[in-house]
Amino acid sequence: MFDKLFGSLSKDLGVDLGTANTLVYVKGKGIVINEPSVVAFNKKTGQILAIGNEARKMVGKTPAHIVASKPLVDGVISDFEVTEKMLRYFIEKVQGEGFSIFPKPRVVIGIPLGVTEVEKRAVEDATISAGARKAYLIEEPMAAAIGARLPIQDPAGSMIVDIGGGTCEIAVISLGGVVTSKSLRIAGDEMDQDIIQFARDSYNLLLGERTAEEIKIAIGSAHELKEPLETMMRGRDLITGLPKEVKINDQETREALSRTVHLIITAIKDTIEATPPELVADIMKKGIVMTGGGSLLKGFAQLVQEETRMPTHLAEDPLTCVVRGCGVVLEDIDTLKEVLVATQYEKPLR
């Protein structure tokens, strides 16, 4: 009874706690926050200086006593305290719009597939410590499938490929559950590292992570493009130590990214191979749906289609699919409770 009363008053949240970006959905309002998962803090005092967009501007530009870092690595929490402070900042940013008399919010938060019990508990504890009344966990591919409006509760197979910053999640879903899945700790961040390594090996040029990401977005591709693209690559010459500028084209970036792209496609094929034939027949009719920022790499869906011989398409607004899925669950939590992951707070005490 009290939970229903609190539920009607509190600003419940859906959170996509990503390695690269954190998105927050507020019940009844939609997506209100989309900021980088970056925190800048002073090592001497332990004080948080900036979170989100402001902190991202500091990456690679800070003095020795200030650190601008990502508290999540490969989709899981690597720094509990900093993650808690970041979550608290986002929760308070939303709650601050209303009165403080409102009860604490319930939070539906996405987690990668195949995380350990310890990693689940870390997310849950960080969410509760940050000011949530209750934390519900949902696997990211399930949330992405709901956000992409796939019929997950039907007795038919739906295949989702969610490529984020730290993880690539591949799952075949039927009757509200994951039938076969694969989770790779290889995704968008690994692509940035591929470009950094390519610049070092080919041009003796040291690039920053932000520069590599900008090159990936501007001219990165998985499949040959109709029109060639090129951009300038700026960094430090490893031989002279002086600034250096090199022109790079889409073919070179494609070569640089080929290893990561190949690993993801191999994982997609392995998942299809492990899927029951009846569900494979369903996927052949409906196709593979790609979500997440990594799926926006030019020509990626086309390459997956050629390699798997199955129709493949990008979801509408792939960057927000996971948080929109969390939002759908939040709006009708009683009906969709079966898609949530069991949490320590719901297990009876012995």
Image (cartoon, rainbow, N blue to C red):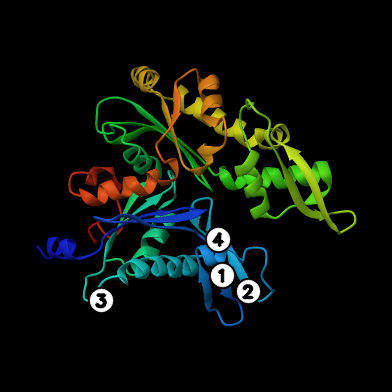
Q: What element carries label 1?
A: strand
Q: Where is residue 204 in the image (x, y as percent from the top left)?
A: 83, 48
Q: How many labels does the image show?
A: 4
Asked whether, in this view, residue 83 is left or right of residue 223, the answer is: left
Residue 167 at x, y = what percent?
A: 51, 45
Q: Which of 229 and 98 is in front in this view?
A: 229
Label 2 near label 1: C-beta < 8 Å? yes
Disc 2 residue type (three-letter): Ile
Tag 3 or tag 2, which sits nearer the N-term? Answer: 2
Image quarter where the C terminus lies is: bottom left
**Helix, strand or loop for disc 2:** strand
Q: Mark 3 or mark 1, which is nearer the start of the sequence? A: 1
Task: Decide if residue 281 is on the left or right side of residue 229.
Answer: left
Percent position (x, y) of residue 22? 44, 56
Give the residue at the far right of this rendering.
Answer: 240
Q: Please rate how many residues cluster around mark 4, counting C-alpha atoms within 10 Å: few if below 14, some from 14 to 19, many from 20.
A: many
Q: Earlier in the sequence, mark 3 or mark 4?
A: 4
Reading the image, the residue beneath label 3 is 100
Q: Tell me which amino acid carries mark 3.
A: Ser
- Mark nearer the viewer, 3 or 4: 3
